[in-house]
Amino acid sequence: QVQLVESGGGLVQAGVSLRLSCTASGSISSITSMGWYRQTPGKQRDFVARITSTGTTNYADSVKGRFTISRNSAKNTVYLQMDSLKPEDTAVYYCKANRNWSEYWGQGTQVTVSS
């Protein structure tokens, strides 16, 4: 089992930056990738960014050039640096880890961007 705890969400104005953190614990040795997804009420959970165990990163088109995913392996933590935030970035952000054939999710952290 893998446990994920997100932090760093909040209420900010458009144009500012915010950094989310996701710390993994438990059986983390075989995690192959970690990523961020986001969800608004009544909509599906959408992919935002991902980083693999080898450091390869992928981003949704809507956040390319504004968001950066990174990791600190020593702290078992993945970060999502969000710059130039827009009101449409408002959502609950979830951290996900892939390990073997399983997926693990965090509880989510709310990000609200006001115009």
Image (cartoon, rainbow, N blue to C red):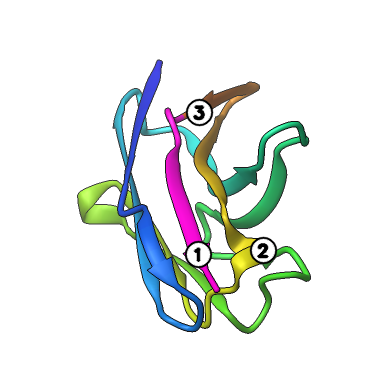
Tell me how far mark 1 sits from mark 2, CA to CA: 8 Å
Q: Which mark is residue 88?
A: 2
> Callout 2: few (<14), some (14-19), or many (20+) C-alpha neighbours within 10 Å?
few
Residue 111, placed above or below residue 109: below
Taking the spot 50% from the left edge, 28% from the top edge, the residue there is: 105
Mark pair 1, 3: CA separation: 23 Å
Helix, strand or loop for disc 3 = strand
Does the magenta-highlighted stretch encompass residue 112? Answer: yes
Q: Nearer the viewer, mark 2 or mark 3?
A: 2
Q: Amino acid at mark 1?
A: Val
Q: Residue at x 39, y 23 (%)?
A: 2
Nearer the viewer's eye, disc 1 or disc 3?
1
Residue 86: tell me if it is visible: yes
Q: Which residue is mark 3?
A: 105
The disc placed on residue 113 is 1
Q: Is residue 32 above or below residue 50?
A: above
Going by the numbered disc 3, the residue's amino acid type is Trp
Range covered by the magenta-colored residues? 106-115
- Would residue 103 appear left or right of 58 to someone viewing this image? left
- For the stretch drawn in magenta, the main secondary structure is strand
Q: Is residue 39 above or below residue 112?
A: above
User: Is 54 left, or right, of 6 in this rendering?
Assistant: right
